[in-house]
Image (cartoon, helix red, strand yellow):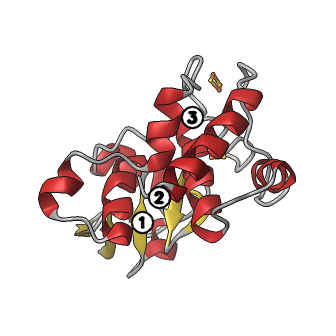
Amino acid sequence: MVTVVVNGVRRDIQSPADTPLLYVLRNDLELSGPQFGCGLAQCGACSVLLDGKEIRSCITPLSSASGKEVTTLEGLPARWAQQKGLSKADADKTLHPVQQAWIEEQTPLCGFCQNGMMIKAAELLEHNATPTLADIKEAFTTSGPSPHLCRCGSYTAIIDAVQRASSLMAKGR
Ligand code: FES
Ligand code: FES
């Protein structure tokens, strides 16, 4: 058994320790945010935060998450609420600024890659609240095991959404 904290809740997972974390999240915990794209750490669709750092869950064994905190797309609102010290009532009606910006910019096309894009944006903005254009491009291209790929070509909309999320965060949203 492997114990992981997923979106703030302790989970005791019975799957074998070498099971890809992505399978555990989707199949055992029924979280549909992380997507199976390539399965080879080459696209970013499966990304989650592990102790705040973006990882590719398709190639990460469950054992690597033992005793650690996993945040999926579903957990971003609570993560933001905790960072802002919001009350439970306010937290329940709050989106993460990244999610709010993605909606306001109408960023997704087919949407398949967007889980990873938002996870990457959340990680970036936690460490750099006012990223430059170069910082954003670097985050989505060379900072991880591969670029985050969007076969629909929504890259400019993603950059706009990260910049909007940065401004929402500056306004305390
Ligand atoms: S599915 Fe994990 S990086 Fe593509
Ligand atoms: S929006 Fe379709 S793959 Fe990115």
For residue 89, which quarter of the picture? bottom left
- Please, what is the three-letter code of the amino acid marked with disc 3? Gln
- Disc 3 C-beta below 8 A from ligand 2: yes
The disc placed on residue 70 is: 1
- SS at badge 3: helix
Label 1, label 3: how far apart the Cα atoms are: 18 Å
The disc placed on residue 21 is: 2
Q: What residue is shown at x 33% (from left), y 64% (from top)?
A: 6
Answer whether residue 62 is visible to the viewer in this image.
Answer: yes
Which residue is disc 3 drawn over?
114
Quadrant containing the N terminus in the rendered view = bottom left
Label 2, label 3: how far apart the Cα atoms are: 19 Å
Residue placed most toward the observer, 146 or 108: 108
Q: What residue is shown at x 35% (from left), y 47% (from top)?
A: 74
Is disc 1 surrounded by few (<14), some (14 to 19) or many (20+) residues within 10 Å? many
Q: Earlier in the sequence, mark 1 or mark 3?
A: 1
Answer whether residue 57 is visible to the viewer in this image.
Answer: no
